[in-house]
Amino acid sequence: MHRYRTHNCGELRAGRVGETVRLSGWVHRVRDHGGIIFVDLRDSHGITQVVVHPERDFYEAVEHWRLESVICFTGVVVQRSPDTVNARLATGEVELDAQEMEILNDSLVLPFSVAVEDDCDENLRLRHRFLDLRRAGLHERILLRSRVVKAIRRILGDDLGFSEFQTPILTKSSPEGARDFLVPSRLHPGKFYALPQAPQLFKQLLMISGFDRYFQIAPCFRDEDARADRSPGEFYQVDLEMAFATQDDVFDVVEKLFTRLFPEFTDKKVSGAPFVRIPYREAMVKYGTDKPDLRIPIEIQDVSELFRDCEFNAFRQVVRGGGVVRAIPARGIAGRPRSFFDNLIAFAQERGGKGLAYLSWVEDGVKSPIAKFFPESALEDLRRRGGLGVGDVMFFVADQEKAATRLAGEVRNRLADLLDLRDDGRFDFCWIVDYPLFELNEETGKIDFSHNPFSLPQGGMEALETQAPLAVLGYQYDLVCNGVELSSGAIRNHRPDIMIKAFAIAGYGESVVEDKFGGLLRAFKFGAPPHGGIAPGLDRLVMLLAGCRNIREVTAFPLNQNAQDLLLGAPGTVDPRQLKDLHIQMKPAKAGKGSQAG
RNA sequence: GGGGGCGUAGCUCAAUUCGGUUAGAGCGCCGGCCUGUCACGCCGGAGGUUGCGGGUUCGAGUCCCGUCGCUCCCGCCA
């Protein structure tokens, strides 16, 4: 008989009745009846009820166990009587009549319950992540992540002809983008490696190296502050790149990946291929964001022209001053109490809006403080544009374009929250396409790359030479699902002359390009194939499938919000000798702030 | 760097409008009882510097100021 177990805790069924078996697992719960004692023994596979009778020589010991101790039982599988079958347990038809018992490891009193998944302080959970990971919810999500990764490798690798590559972890600091994690060099005093923010340059180099379809479950490192959906430190991308590919080819592969992957892990309705494509500028008007939740049945409209000559002074001035008015229709809420509208107005003001006007269509006409400013025909025009009827409302935001767009989008999302407008049974994918290649940096007034500097401009060199920089579109795209930005990608610029021209427009001279991207530029001069790709975020993907909002709920060992590992104590101090090797001299630190880990 | 929310037993929470008796409950822990439970049940017990410091007050968990920590957001995230 195996030293620890002949079966796991989730597999015994009536067919094994009468057999002598051995199980090992954690004490999940104990029900001590004075005479008979029931132990729920748990492992990763499930729970089996173990029965300890008073005559066993280990009976006394059982009373002193603590929950989560690790125990090995040997005994006979027994059929439960019909009235004691537990239908909620996969193994509930049978139980183990314990005849031998061995304690493999005791547990201290628990800092929080494993069996009952109460909320508790997250740092307490992180300090005891090994206990947290035993709890069913997190345990299952981490296993889900494992299955998702396995399926991605199968679909991309086996079905779609991608090869998996590893790329360096010690690489070069990138001049743009997020803050880098730096690793000091021992052999080269004063120089540093950087951890990759993404394998961007390497995957392009792989294409230039003649490989055809690359993918990697790639770790990415960015030293940025945390958010609920953003780890401080590291996260993973399903990074992929294709040679001789057009934008349509990339879309086709990604649509195949997700329309195959999602149904394996969810019963919700998943968009069919091809996914809806929405030009960036259209998305910004209709949804007020470039990551729209298409489950929300509200489309914002630009109604600026209707207000240019209206008698409502506030809006007229905004429009004549170069601003815009955006209309947000909402059905069936005209009867909501005044407080509903007041709260929404307060919300808009909190988010930097000047206000939020609205028209309500009721039985006897249009009810609104601002209705008097508009002729009947204008009101009817608005009603028709929104497809509205009695009981419906239209909200208005007026401001400069950028602010009005953002606020209208936030109001749209807010309405969806308040009115429960998102259908939880759907995964609605869409592509956001035609991003501008450049954008205006409002602080400096200069032109920056909007997405990344490696994208191919639509229209190629001719577009860069003849169009206004801000009008040039790129072959750049985002994949969005249910309001979550799942990934960004692009068809790359593989021509050195176009690359130098694009950087020149962004204010970088050829010598800068040579200095920062010399390797890639050199590669472009030796027969680079056209190529492009995309990099869906694995963590966000699993979050979507698991239906959770916090990235730490799909990560086995996340850093906390202050980028600390509270279990192992990172970041930590190092031996002075290590610093000496690295040619590093410490300046006296300010009095330590929260740098102790438990 | 900035803003909002929070901080009471090992854990999750409560503590009456405007500050008023000995700060309570469930789970867990310790002890006792209980032979068919499966969130077992019953009886008893231990466990608190109300994050910390200061202030107002006859009196502060409650109000004010400061500080520390947590969390969500803004900045940031090519």
Image: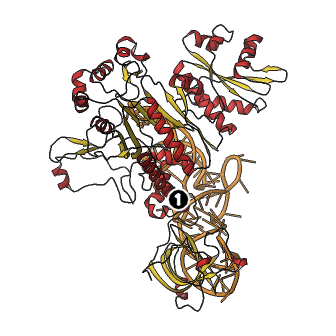
Q: How is the image coloured?
A: secondary structure
Q: State which chain disc 1 sits on.
A: A
Q: Position of residue A252 (x, y in %)?
A: 48, 35
Q: Position of residue A163 (x, y in %)?
A: 36, 45
State the residue at coordinates (36%, 52%): A595
Which quadrant of the structure image shows residue A507?
Answer: top left
Q: Position of residue A7 (x, y in %)?
A: 50, 75
* Mark 1: amino acid: Glu
Left or right: residue A162 compared with residue A274: left
Whether residue A576 is visible to the viewer of this picture, yes or no, is yes
Residue nearest the observer in this picture, A49 or A230: A49
Image position of B48 with respect to A82: above or below: above
Left or right: residue A77 compared with residue A164: right
Q: Position of residue A178 (x, y in %)?
A: 36, 36
Mark 1, residue position: A140
Image position of A13 with respect to A422: above or below: below
Q: Quadrant of the N terminus of chain A?
A: bottom left
State the residue at coordinates (39%, 40%): A240
Name the element at disc 1: helix
Which quadrant of the structure image shows residue A295?
Answer: top right
Residue nearest the observer in this picture, A107 or A505: A505
Residue nearest the observer in this picture, A464 or A412: A464
